[in-house]
């Protein structure tokens, strides 16, 4: 009888723990959306570049920290979600979650603006473009990836300057970008240069770049936006020059997931650039909000 009572007590305790966890998740979201709506009401609807500038000045000078929308593991611990800074900023600006091939925001005059965020010195992801595969994707992951207990992960950092990464190098030719085995020179994947240039001419005609800083509070990430720069009039010629000079990095992000019946998970092959090189892709740039902490360091 005593053991039975103990079992009931443990079960009740577990149920109470799950209820508390659910209530915490609900309250987190309610409080967050109240904050988001306050920001949106204060900004109004974004129709012009001036509206966007006013909105960013309000967000970047408020000093507010924004909690990440992290989920929860079964044990109650929070789990990390990628791309939270960008998601939070888009939510504050009233942009619906998307994975568009074109820019995130279209203003009333037809101007298209892509929103980009990054933290400190981390590269900025311009977008993703799948390669033409010269050998099967699974074979690539198995041959050039790293085996972990839960997955075989293939992550490489490739530049047109010919740096070696995971046994692969880039051969930048007149019309194609070819990724080849560094020893056998066997082709692994490839892009037409014209396809890459056309992709990003359409994706990033204008860019709002916002710098975020991160902190952890009770194992949960929070973000604050501290600066914003608006880049306009994308230059395809300068973009291609940066690509050929290795200033734009190509990063495959793939894995075979052992926990999901060896299914291939592909986060997309990302084209990334440092913040200092972003300016070179555009004919015009203007700093809307300057990071005060950067000025103090100088």
Image (cartoon, grey):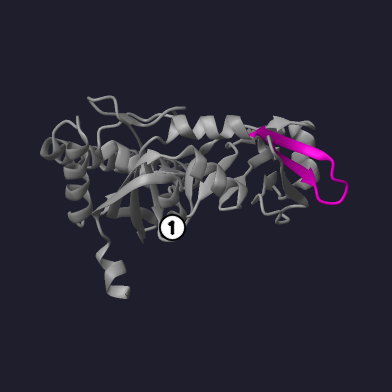
Report x, y in % for residue 96.
32, 29
Name the quadrant of the C terminus. Answer: bottom left
**Residue that extends furthest to the right in the rendered view of this protein:** 184
Residue at x-position 78% and y-position 31%: 134
Locate residue 219: give its quadrant: bottom left
Q: 47 or 174, which lies in front? A: 174
In the image, is 103 to the left or to the right of 62?
Answer: right
Locate residue 150: give its quadrant: top right
Report x, y in % for residue 104.
36, 31
Q: Is residue 16 visible?
A: no
Confirm whether the magenta stretch covers residue 198: no
Q: Is residue 295 visible?
A: yes
Residue at x-position 38% and y-position 48%: 117
**Residue that extends furthest to the left in the rendered view of this protein:** 42
Residue at x-position 70% and y-position 29%: 132
In the image, is 27 to the left or to the right of 136?
Answer: left
Residue at x-position 43% and y-position 44%: 83
Which residue bears the numbered disc 1? 276
Report x, y in % for residue 46.
20, 32
Report x, y in % for residue 190.
71, 35
Highlighted range, magenta: 176-192
Q: How many marks?
A: 1
The correct choice, above or below, for 101 with respect to 293 in the image is: above
Locate residue 203: give its quadrant: top left
């Amino acid at each position: 009888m005593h053991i039975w009572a103990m079992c009931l007590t443990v079960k009740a305790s577990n149920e109470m723990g799950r209820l508390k966890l659910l209530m915490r998740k609900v309250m987190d979201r309610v409080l967050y959306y109240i904050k988001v709506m306050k920001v949106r009401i204060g900004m109004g609807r974004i129709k012009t570049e001036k509206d966007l500038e006013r909105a960013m000045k309000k967000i970047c000078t408020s000093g507010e920290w924004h909690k990440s929308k992290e989920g929860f593991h079964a044990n109650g611990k929070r789990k990390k979600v990628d791309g939270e800074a960008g998601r939070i900023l888009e939510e504050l600006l009233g942009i619906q979650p998307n994975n568009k091939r074109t820019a995130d925001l279209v203003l009333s005059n037809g101007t298209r603006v892509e929103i980009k965020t990054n933290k400190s010195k981390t590269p900025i992801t311009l977008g993703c473009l799948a390669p033409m595969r010269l050998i099967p994707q699974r074979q690539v992951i198995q041959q050039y990836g790293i085996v972990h207990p839960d997955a075989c992960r293939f992550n490489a950092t490739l530049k047109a300057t010919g740096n070696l990464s995971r046994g692969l190098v880039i051969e930048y030719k007149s019309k194609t970008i070819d990724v080849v085995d560094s020893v056998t020179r066997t082709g692994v994947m490839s892009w037409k240069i014209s396809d890459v240039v056309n992709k990003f001419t359409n994706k990033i005609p204008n860019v709002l770049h916002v710098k975020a800083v991160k902190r952890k509070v009770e194992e949960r990430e929070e973000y604050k936006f501290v600066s914003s720069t608006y880049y306009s009039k994308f230059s395809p010629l300068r973009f291609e020059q940066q690509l050929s000079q290795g200033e734009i990095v190509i990063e495959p992000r793939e894995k075979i997931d052992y926990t999901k019946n060896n299914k291939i998970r592909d986060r997309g092959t990302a084209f990334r650039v440092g913040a200092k090189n972003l300016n070179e892709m555009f004919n015009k740039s203007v700093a809307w909000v300057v990071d005060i902490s950067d000025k103090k360091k100088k």
